[in-house]
Image (spheres, grey):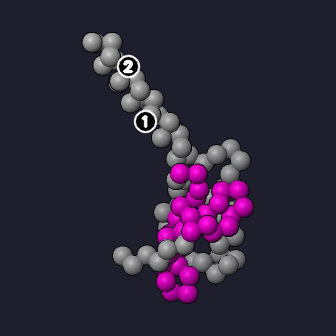
Amino acid sequence: MKLRYVAIAMAAAMTAASLARADQPGADWMPADQVIQKLTAKGYTNFGKVEADDGHWELEADLKGVRYDLHVDPRSGEVTKSERDDD
């Protein structure tokens, strides 16, 4: 019975560790500052909260006075998701 609890605890720890690694930029990712340069060229400004999340760059930025939550492909720098941030 004790071995079962140890196995469950180890599985939980391994899952947590893999999730933490998943939120780190990959070795083949474009650096965040390069992503910001590409988005600036497309008219985005006032960048905030740039972080790696679930296989993409996630950030906030303004476009034409409207705040957006963006997902950006980490290799191409292209916006893959754009949602208006109404907060």
Q: Residue at x 49, y 70 (%)?
A: 69
The amino acid type, in three-letter code, at marker 2 is Ala
Comparing 47 with 8, the one in front is: 8
Looking at this rendering, what residue extends furthest in the bottom direction? 64
* SS for dot 2: helix
Position of residue 25 measured from the top left corner of the image (x, y, whole percent) = 60, 48
Residue 55 visible in this rendered orientation of the protein:
yes
Answer few, some or many: residues within 10 Å of disc 2's Cα (few below 14, many 20 plus, some between 14 and 19): few
Q: Residue at x 50, y 36 (%)?
A: 18
Comparing 15 with 85, the one in front is: 15
The amino acid type, in three-letter code, at marker 1 is Ala
Position of residue 84 measured from the top left corner of the image (x, y, whole percent) = 47, 78
Q: Residue at x 36, y 76 (%)?
A: 87
Residue under label 2:
7
- Image check: 86 left or right of 69? left
Residue 30 image-quadrant placement:
bottom right
Up the image or down, 80 lies above or below 22; here it is: below
Measured Cα–Cα span from mark 2 to mark 1: 14 Å
* Residue 16: mark in rendering: 1
Up the image or down, 32 lies above or below 22; here it is: below
Position of residue 61 measured from the top left corner of the image (x, y, whole percent) = 53, 73
Residue 64 painted magenta: yes
In primary-sequence order, the first of circles 2 and 1 is 2
User: Quadrant where the N terminus lies?
Assistant: top left
Position of residue 59 measured from the top left corner of the image (x, y, whole percent) = 52, 65
Up the image or down, 57 lies above or below 27; here it is: below
In this rendering, the label closer to the viewer, 2 or 1: 2
Looking at this rendering, what residue extends furthest in the left direction? 1
* SS for dot 1: helix
Q: Which residues are magenta?
A: 54-81
* Residue 75: mark in rendering: none
Up the image or down, 46 lies above or below 25; here it is: below
